[in-house]
Image (tube, rainbow, N blue to C red):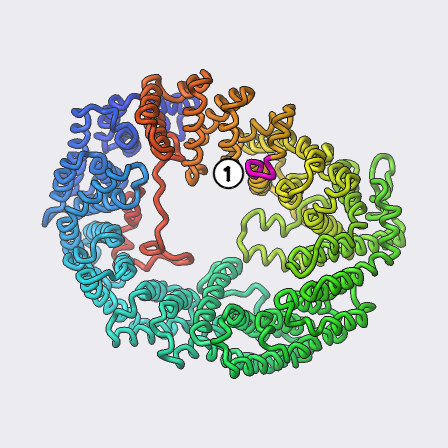
Amino acid sequence: AAVRAAADPMAAADARAAATNYLNSARAAPAAAKAAAGAALCADVSDVSVALFGYSLLADAVRYQWDALDAATRAQLIDLSIRSLRGIAEDAAAAPRVPRVIRSKAGVLAAEMHRVAPSAQRSEILAAVCALAAPGCAPAAAEVVCYVLAAVSDDATVHVDELDGEERRTLLSDVTGALGDILALLYRTLESSFVAAMGAAQQGGGAQQALQAHASALNAALAAVGAFANWAPLTALAQSRVAEACAAIMGVEELRGGALSCLKLLLERKRGREADAQAYDHMAGVALQALCKAADSIPPRASHADEFPQIVCNSLAASATNLGNLPAEWQEGMLQRMLRFLDSPSVHQSFAAVGFWVTVMREGAYAGRSAELQSTLLALCCKRCVRFTRETGPEDTYPEEEFDSAGEYHDFFSNYRHKLVDLTRVLAGMSPSLAARALLEQMRAVAEVGARAEAAVLAGQSARAALAELEATTVFAGGIAGVYERLDAARITTQDVEAITQAVQGVAGCMWSSKPVMDKLAQLLEGLAPLYGLVVPALPAVLQCLFGSLQRVPASRLGSASCLYKLVRRSPRAFMAHRAALTQATDAVQPLLTFREWGFLATAALTIACHEGQDAAMGTVRWIMTPFQRDPQLQAWIATYTQSFDGFMRGAFACTLVNGVWVQSSDSVEVNAALERRRVVFHTFEVVHRLHRSLNTAGANVERASLKREADWLLMPLLATVRHLHNVWINRLQLSEPLLSALAMSGLEVAVMLGGGRGTVLEQKASAIEAGEYHDIDGVSSACLRNWMNGLRDNSYGMLALCFGSLTASEALTRAFVECAGDAAALRAMEHKHVRMLIRHVLQPLVRFECADGARLLLTAIYRELFPQMYTRLTEGWASLAAGASAGGALLPARAGEPAANAAESDVVLDRIMRELSREYAGLLGSLVAAPASFYLDALLQEGGAAAQALVLFPAACVCFPDGESSHRICGLAAELVSRACKDARLHAPVGTDLLRAAINALLLETNANHFAEVLTIIQRVLVSLSPHVPAVRQTMLSFISEQALAQLEADFTRKGGGSEKTRNAVIKRCLQMQSGGALKALASQAKTAPLTNLPTPHTRAPKPHPAIAAAQADADEAAAPKLDFS
């Protein structure tokens, strides 16, 4: 009655709650009572919900409390499981009256009994189960037996986490001993079910029920074969002839899906030696004959809706690792078929073929054997790198036949292109000379393709196809260039260098004048950067091309300057002879450039100078800093607008305080002046930040500290600017438009937070670019103001992290830095994502920075303010999310013409932000364990106070956050606190009570499954080190486990010294599982992630069923295909 009441949606809420509480109490009952109740309930198969609850009670008792049952009860449960299966088989002989879900649960229970039973009884259980599938049995009986066998295989090889080493070996040995009988039964089931299903299909509509029953048994048998095909000895599999059975089933279109999966699994096995090798060769021959026959039946342009070609291709690709061991005629046939798949119109088929060719070529069996084959593959790689386009379609076109959206296509194509680049690199590594010739051929085609694109752009027509070809050539060239960068010089011939030089000179000689084409040319030159060390004679042409574009194509100046900087950063020594020409050319075009464009060129010159020596680097740094020191706008900013927050608001936003509200001036001259100041300030800090990054990677040729000191005069204005930027959040309630909207997240940020995938993000990015809101700061809209503040923050944080040496060398700078980063009011007012950026880019590098103890004492003030606020921010934030009391749509920006963002969407964004913030802060605290960061931990714990309390209490809170990564990162600090608690009585209560209770509660969360061993280690160390001295430890444990269980745990710890930590962890794990009745989800057996074998690949749809099967599957209970949950 309680089960029916809890499952009845029409029942009163009070009645359902009372029923649910009663059922929960049944789950918490002693093992014997739970087993008795489960046995009584599962006997009533007339009510599905009642029987299911009974089986769940039995499963809990068997899996988690088996040791607590006496021998008589265990024997009764084993007998019950066999009788349940026998009853189902006998009932199915007349009609399949038992629902499939009940048959599934009965099969799972029988497999569970086989797992926990003594070794001597397993053969009896397995024999009793297999006897139900004797020749002539009902199809439902064979089906349920196959379910049991598949679960037995998984128990022996996959779900073994809860067994110790000896138990695993014994279980696997027992299953292996019965393998011959199991595989023979499966072959017999495949044969009989296949013949019966074909006969029923020929009879037509009158045999639909029989057809479905036999098809279900066949699919269950194929699933069981797949489970054993992963690990069973190859000799046993070959002798069972299951490969021949699957090959026969492949001849029927409606039934071949499961057979394909089994053949794929067999082909993926390692060949082994001697007898295993012979067995593999036999099964591989059978499988490949069937698969090649299927591949030959596929038309050249198969329908995209039919996924059978893709599945066949995936299955053939599984033989790649063993292809060299097959007969020569088989190898040639396979290679020709996979070449056809590689050039297939279907990108899914081509994707599988790329993986095959990467494996085959990486194995080296075909190295040097066929230059023609390698050249063909290189040409196909470049051809297939072209992204799908439609000249007449919209910008987000995609193959609708294979994908449901442009975002899905973009995500898939990125992985596909990455595989193509992998294949290109493998081929280039095998034969550099062939790769050089292929590169030269593609570069010669660039001039023609670029000219075609240029003509189309100038004529106002679409050039998308030509631009897509240029993009594909860039990707292909980048793959080859990356190989040459790491190639042994002895393998590079003079002819190769000449071919590459001609290729680079040919590309650099293109003088196009339209922005889209010039941008693609800059990207191509950037992709060729790893080759510039080999082709020094071609570098003047490259520099002339890029500097010419600065004057010829004004719209592409930023891209060209950025490209030149990236080229130099990639191969600085190759450009050393051209530094003087670079600086002269930069001075010549400086009047045409913005600060940002000039900054890229100047930093490129500095990168070269740092490889020349100290004098050249110092001269270049001073050359870079001179324009900033002389710039009147920047000097006015420093002198006037950084001295107070009022000055900052007036100088940056043209805002004044009117009746308590910051209002933007209506004077256009004043607004434009503020815009110009923003531009100057932004690009100043951006360029100087890039300068410091270049110096940070300069190497041993220069003394970096003296070079960095040339920009120290900017540090105090920078700190003042950042402090005022933080104060904007303090005054948020006093802001007016458009500055108020600038504090909201952009649509692109929301798309990233919502996890829409790369395609969705690209769509949002395209919309932002079209609206002039992507990284654009030259405007007065809220989007431009947001971009300015975010960019200024990022560059400022990055520069501060690179200037810790200067900041800590001066007490005045140190105090200013503390005032900037440790302002309590600003830390309270800033949004989560901005606090995360501060922690990630400034405070995390700061704790690991080596400096004098006097400076560290001053810097401790930052963490003294940060730790209490972060404890409150994170605990309250997660509690708010759990209670559903978040801010709703207030987090997200309102879009024109659309209603405010809904609360659900906002909660998703807030959840993502909370996870990221929790991870960064947990990582910061976790780094306090090791020197030099441990200085701050020692100092704060010694002085006590709110910061120390927040520091000590946070691990207990964090391990219970529903974010596994945060919990994982904080475990280091938790373990450190446990070790310190032995010597510090102040930590006894927080560690012995709060942390211990939190660690056990953390095991309730499935998110902690990946690092449950670390959580168990914390519990174990608390028990071992603190329990003898702190009575609260035992009291805390008694709130989770019984007195008897705790006494047994302590006895196990004291016996022979308790063994290793791993042994003690296993004891605690077993104790907690038994006492909780399986409620600790983090300790539940986690199925290991296997390679894609019998699982469908992404973007696939189920094969089309036989019409008779489809009609039969329309029945309410038996409609679904047999997909069982064995968890």
In the image, taking residue 970 as reference, residue 131 lies left or right, namely left
Q: Which residues are magenta?
A: 927-934
Image quadrant assignment for residue 1099: bottom left
Q: Position of residue 309 (x, y in %)?
A: 34, 66
Q: Quadrant of the N terminus?
A: top left
Residue at 46 percent of width and 79 percent of height: 434
Quadrant placement of the C terminus: top left
* Depth order, front residue of 16/596: 596
Looking at the image, residue 184 sits to the left or right of residue 231; the answer is left
Residue 120 x, y percent position in the rendering: 14, 36
Q: Is residue 499 above or below residue 223?
A: below
Q: Nearer the viewer, residue 865 or 1093?
A: 865
Which residue appears farthest toward the left when viewing the image? 135
Q: Is residue 353 visible?
A: no
**In x, y percent, where is residue 53?**
30, 30
Left or right side of 943 for 10: left
Q: Is residue 790 left or right of residue 267?
A: right
Amino acid identity at mark 1 = Asp
Q: Is residue 923 above or below residue 69?
A: below
State whether residue 730 is above or below residue 1092: above
Give the quadrant of residue 311: bottom left
Q: Residue, x 27% and y 62% (percent of image)?
A: 267
The x and y percentages for residue 900 are 65, 43
Residue linked to disc 1 = 963
